[in-house]
Amino acid sequence: MRGKSEEEMKQNGISLHPLDVAAGPEPELLCIFGTGDLGRSLGLRLLQSGYGVVYGSRKPHSCGPLPQGAQVMTHAEAAQSSNLIFICVHREHYEFLTTMEHHLKGKVNKHKPTINNLKKGMYPEANAKNKNISGFYLNCVQVFLCGESGEAKQAVAHLATKLGLTVMDIGSLSAARELEDFPLKLFPEWRLPLSIAVGLTVFFFFYLLIRDVIYAYVEKKDEISYRIMVSLTSKVFPIVALGMLSLCYLPGAIAAFFQLYRGTKYRRFPNWLDRWMLCRKQMGLVALGFAFLHAIYTFIIPIRYSVRHKLISGVMKNNKTTPFYFDNTNAWRMDSFLSLGILGFFLFVLLGLTSLPSVGGSLSWRELNFIQSKLGHLTLFVCTAHGYIYGWNRFLRPSTYKWYTPPGYVLCLIVPSVVLVLKLLLLLPCVDRGKTRCFCLLPGWLPGWLPASSPGQRSV
């Protein structure tokens, strides 16, 4: 009975039996010259991405621990086993490449993280004959790629994409010298903004030190050096913040007047103005940092000993029979001053957030232009009004000009006021029409270029 049921099951069903599992394809083998920290980290990442890794080393039998699954050979043997080679050695050890010219023919050589950082005459097979060499520089999750061979760059781009990186092709191998300096650069775009910020900070610190502390000691024999730590610095930070913010928008106004004067936008700006405009984002972020310091110092002012002592002394000095006069104008002034300060700081932070790549990348060009231009000038206007209300009418008092020097807030309001006046002039209908005419495409002119009479000169 049992045998009959089994026969019926075989006739009515499908007999199952184990199938031979086909062997998976062999992983692509990649070669890495160098078994140091960079080579081991890169090899581990390649192994995790499904590649095979073979290391080329001067001492294959004593090269230290390597990722599990990787092989190690001599440089010549490793080069013959793969068509794609990573060079992860220091430049002082590049001499061995000159002895491997015949092994590197037809290979895709990738220098990482520095590109083609070879001395003249070294590694001639890569510099002259081997067109498959590719520069490969990794910056966080973005890869800068250069090379002479399109096939080689395509292979490198495919590999980088498989590793989860974004590829940016910057052209031929001639750009390798520029990419070579990338790992050695130290905040190149921040040098000018930081230099200006440090210069302004030092200048206004000593300027206010002379006016507030030294003047009081010399003229009144009053020892108030304790104000240096909080009172003095809390005056310096908003001055520098407003100055840096105004310097962020001043070059745009100057550039607009340059274009109006020339009657066209198809001419380069002067080098100093071009460099100034390229670091406006960094200037704005530095200004935001000083604004944060100003806000923090403002919060701690009420808990200072000197402020509490002054408040208690004032209460004890006024007895109950003396009425306390309420100044309505002064109340409006203080409330407006605080309100504009809070609003200006909020707009300041909003501008800083939109400068983040993750936020700015999600905005359209018109949205980003509105925030950075329209909202930026509104921020400058609010912060400038905050400074004017702080000064109020004190600039009219002769006692304000100690040793015939103006207060610090008077000096810091000069540049923002100039920027706002220039912006207002650019918004006038007569000036705005001329600006629009400059931006229109004239007959015979190509977008982004000068007329044919001035070849080779690019626009900004």
Image (tube, helix red, strand yellow):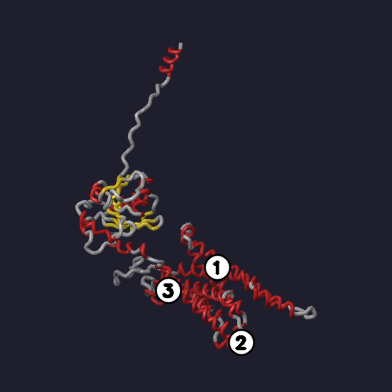
For residue 15, side relative to residue 235 (left or right): left
Residue 204, position as x, y percentages in the image: 52, 79
Residue drawn 37% across the image and 65% down it: 185
Q: Secondary structure at mark 1?
A: helix
Q: Nearer the viewer, residue 15 or 321?
A: 321
Using the numbered discs, state the Cα–Cα distance from disc 3 to disc 2 in whole angstroms.
Answer: 50 Å
Which corner quadrant of the image does residue 437 belong to? bottom left
Res. 260 mark? none
Residue 460, position as x, y percentages in the image: 38, 69
CB within 8 Å, label 1 to label 2 = no
Residue 96, position as x, y percentages in the image: 23, 56
Q: Nearer the viewer, residue 394 or 455?
A: 394
Q: Nearer the viewer, residue 246 or 304?
A: 304
Q: Is residue 414 above or below residue 194?
A: below
Residue corresponding to mark 3? 255
Residue drawn 57% across the image and 75% down it: 229
Badge 2: residue crowd in 10 Å (few <14, some 14–19, many ≥20): few
Residue corresponding to mark 1? 292
Residue corresponding to mark 2? 221
Outermost top residue: 1
- Is label 3 or label 2 in front? 2
Residue type at the position of mark 1: Phe
Q: Is residue 106 visible?
A: yes
Using the numbered discs, state the Cα–Cα distance from disc 1 to disc 2 in whole angstroms.
Answer: 34 Å
- Is label 3 or label 1 in front? 1
Badge 1: residue crowd in 10 Å (few <14, some 14–19, many ≥20): some
- Labels 1 and 2: the sequence-earlier one: 2
Residue 109, position as x, y percentages in the image: 27, 54
